[in-house]
Each structure stands twice: as structure tokens, then as C-alpha cells.
Image (tube, rainbow, N blue to C red):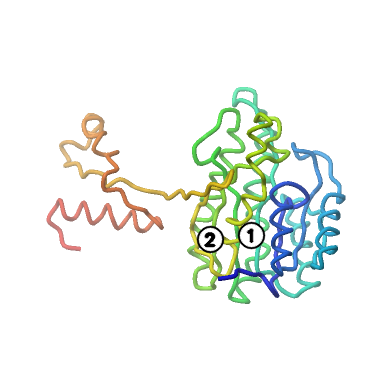
Amino acid sequence: MTIRFDNQVAIVTGAGNGLGKSHALELARLGAKVVVNDFGGARDGSGGSSEAAEKVVAEIQAAGGEAIANGADVSSPEQVEAMVKQAMGTWGRVDVLINNAGILRDKSFAKMTQDDWDKVVAVHLTGSEICSRAVWPIMREQSYGRIVMTTSTSGLYGNFGQANYGAAKMAVAGLMNTLCLEGEKYDIKINCIAPTAATRMTEDLMPPEVLAMLEPKAITPAVLFLCSQQAPTHRIVLAGAGCYAMVRLMESEGVYLDENERNVDGVAAHFERIGNMDNAREILAGGDHVTKILTKAAHAKGIKL
């Protein structure tokens, strides 16, 4: 099996450096026409320049590929709409969107300003929503689309000093959970990547010997699979240092409490059983949970559904 992207158009946000650049270069090498988006700001989102994106485009073109640069701020609906129109005007379709753009404003929650919170959420979460919304009607119309959201272990598991970043990154997984259901009949598949890589976002957070193990290019194979024709949907894949894993949202079997136990003491008494994961199962939609608890309650009451 050889996965390629011939005749496909891909938009990669935050593609002027690091992970986005790696994704854009490999997509182009495998045949995609690439919109290299990068606002060109500093790590905290300030400033702006098209230079980084233009350099990546030049590198793609020098290797014989097709690419255009775009400097849209992903948190601006108007700028993102113009970016998508640029792609459509140039190539007439959009097959792949990789929501990679991001900024950091790390502070403990006690010291974090509202602006620190708002800007990080605007780029990571709202930016992913804005870009996805902009390509959604195109993908529906052509009955094909692949979107990769960039989540993080900071959101999935938590990380000190990253309440804003972690909340936004967990939220993009929530966005995936619904979009994959709404896009299913149009062959629009949505997945998440949780990367651990040495980029300008992490360069001062880890020692040099660790950063050397975390090349961005080790993340790209997983990302490209998640946006390929063979892609699954509704998956969260972790990648870093050549290691790949998957997170699944599992739910314990839980317990049914009779009315005489349905109080705070009853929950406390059964809390270990409530959290027992021996018979846990993956829940893929909110309705699956509702069906589970109604079935359990009906069985306890001797009711046939």
C-alpha cells in the first residue's frame, strides 16, 4: 500500500515552522497541492509576517511541488474565508484541512489574565472551528473531506501552567466528537493528533538531549494517515519520539442504585464499583451512553424496552 495525495488540495495552518512545516512538506512530496498558512507571529501570538510561509512554499516549489502561501489569522473568520477562497480559486477544491496553528501563553491559573485565556482559546479552539466551518460546505458538496485537529496531552491529561491551552486542546477533541458524526454521510472524516515534538512552542521546556529525540517529522506520518483516503474517523492518536499510541474514551459499566440508596451516602458507598473499569467499553456518541443507562435502569426495574 502506498498512500499518496495526488490531485488533492490540503490546507495546513501554522505551517511556517515546526510541525506544520513538516506536514506541508510531506503532503507536497506525496502529491498534494498545499496552502501553507502561517500568521507569522511570535509564540505568544503577537506580531505577524508572511516570510516563514513563503519560505516553505519556495522549498516545496524547488522540489517540484505546488503550493501557495497565506498569512490568515485563524481566529479571524474573514481572513480564513479569504484563505479558502484563495485555495478554491487556485485549485477548485479542498480535500484536507490540518488545524495545526497554535500559540502559548503559559502561566499558573492564579497569574493568568483573561486576555491570556481568551487569545489561546481563540487560536486553538475557535481557530479550529473557524477553519473547519470554512471548508465544511465544500467538503459536503464534493462528498469527501479529511480534517485533523491538533489536541495535546496537556488537554487530555493536564499540565501545570497550561489551563488555557489544556482547556482549548481538550475542547478540539470535543469538536471532533460531534463533527465526525455530522460528516459521516458525506465521507468527511475527523481525527485528532496529540503530538510531542521539539518546536519553538517547546524549545525552552525540555533539555537539549530530550528535544533531539522529538523531531517534528516523527509526528507527520500519523497525521498524514489520519487525513488520507484510508483514514479512520473519531480517533485520537498520540505521537512523539517514534512512538505512536491511541486514546479512547472509555466508560465503566457503573452501577444502578435503588431509590433508597440514591443519595450522597449511597454514591460514596458504591464509589469504587462506579469507577471499576474491568468491563469498561468505548462510547462513541452521547446516545450510546443514554441507551446504556436506560437499559440498565429498565433491567433493574424489570421493564422491557
Q: Does 260 sit left or right of 222 as displayed?
A: left
The residue lying at 52 percent from left, 49 percent from top is 244
Badge 1 crowding class, 10 Å Cα cut-off, few under 14, some 14 to 19, many 20 or more, is: many
Task: From the viewer's side, name the closer residue of 33 and 294.
Answer: 33
Task: From the viewer's side, name the closer residue of 94 and 74.
Answer: 94
Badge 2 crowding class, 10 Å Cα cut-off, few under 14, some 14 to 19, many 20 or more, is: many
Q: Does 28 sit left or right of 4 as displayed?
A: right
Element under disc 1: helix
Eyeballing the image, is 278 above or below 229?
A: above
Amino acid type of disc 1? Ser
Image coords of residue 273 (percent x, y):
23, 38
Toward the left, the furthest residue is 302
Amino acid type of disc 2? Leu
Residue with the mark numbered 1: 132
The residue lying at 69 percent from left, 56 percent from top is 23
Element under disc 2: helix
Disc 2 to disc 1: CB gap under 8 Å: yes
Task: From the viewer's side, name the closer residue of 164 and 203.
Answer: 203
Disc sitting over residue 294 in the figure: none
Image coords of residue 104 (percent x, y):
69, 36
Toward the top, the furthest residue is 110
Q: How many marks?
A: 2
CA gap, disc 2 and disc 1: 9 Å
Q: Quadrant of residue 37?
A: bottom right
Q: Quadrant of residue 255?
A: top left
* Disc nearer the start of the sequence (2/1): 1
Residue with the mark numbered 2: 179
Image coords of residue 297 (percent x, y):
21, 51
Q: Does 152 sit left or right of 6 as displayed?
A: left
Quarter of the figure with the C terminus: bottom left
Image coords of residue 222 (percent x, y):
58, 56
Quarter of the figure with the N terminus: bottom right
